[in-house]
Amino acid sequence: MLGAGSGTLGPVTDDTTSEPDLEQLVGDWLTVPEIAERLHVPLSRVRGMLADRELIGARVGPNRAMKVPARFVGAEGPLPELRGTFTVLADGGMSDEESLRWLHTPDPTLPVGGSPVDALLAGHKTEVRRRAMELAF
């Protein structure tokens, strides 16, 4: 749907020789209709969440459907602790796909010893955003 700065999510390359496949790295994904059903909102509202960068996603799978990592969506909607980090990563020049890859790549130096998204969800927003800002320099 929407990518950082460009207004569109660019083509996703299949060159995974040096990096794990994004679909496998993230694990559980939700499609736009699945998010709408889960939150009891219209499809247009979910598309608005993507446009407003409350959520980010990528076109993955054999049909290249727009999907969002399942853990980004709570019972009430997009997890609020993620939005600021999405902004920092986009401001640093990362595409949505690059942001998703960075957020889900394990980093043993983080306080929780998992990925940046694990650290965010464990309450370490400041540390994760500091590291995200460092990527821009």
Image (cartoon, rainbow, N blue to C red):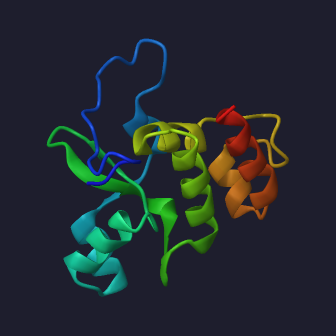
Question: Which corner quadrant holds the C terminus?
Answer: top right
Q: Residue furthest top?
A: 17
Of residues 20 and 94, the one nearer the viewer is 94
Of residues 11 and 32, the one nearer the viewer is 11
Instruction: Specify whether 102 is left or right of 27.
Output: right
Q: Residue furthest left?
A: 63
Measured as percent of width and height from the top left, residue 62 is found at 17, 38
Instruction: Specify whether 134 is left or right of 12.
Output: right
Q: Residue furthest bottom?
A: 40
Instruction: Specify whether 74 is left or right of 108.
Output: left
Question: Which corner quadrant holds the N terminus?
Answer: bottom left
> How many marks overall?
0
Image quadrant in which you'd find residue 45: bottom left
The structure residue drawn at horizontal position 59% and vertical position 73%, both measured from the top left corner, is 80
Can residue 64 be seen?
Answer: yes
The structure residue drawn at horizontal position 43% and vertical position 40%, both measured from the top left corner, is 95
Image quadrant in which you'd find residue 6: top left
Measured as percent of width and height from the top left, residue 57 is found at 37, 52
Can residue 114 be seen?
Answer: no
Measured as percent of width and height from the top left, residue 63 is found at 14, 43
Instruction: Specify whether 10 is left or right of 52.
Output: left
Of residues 108 and 7, the one nearer the viewer is 7
Measured as percent of width and height from the top left, residue 122 is found at 75, 62
The structure residue drawn at horizontal position 28% and vertical position 86%, both measured from the top left corner, is 41
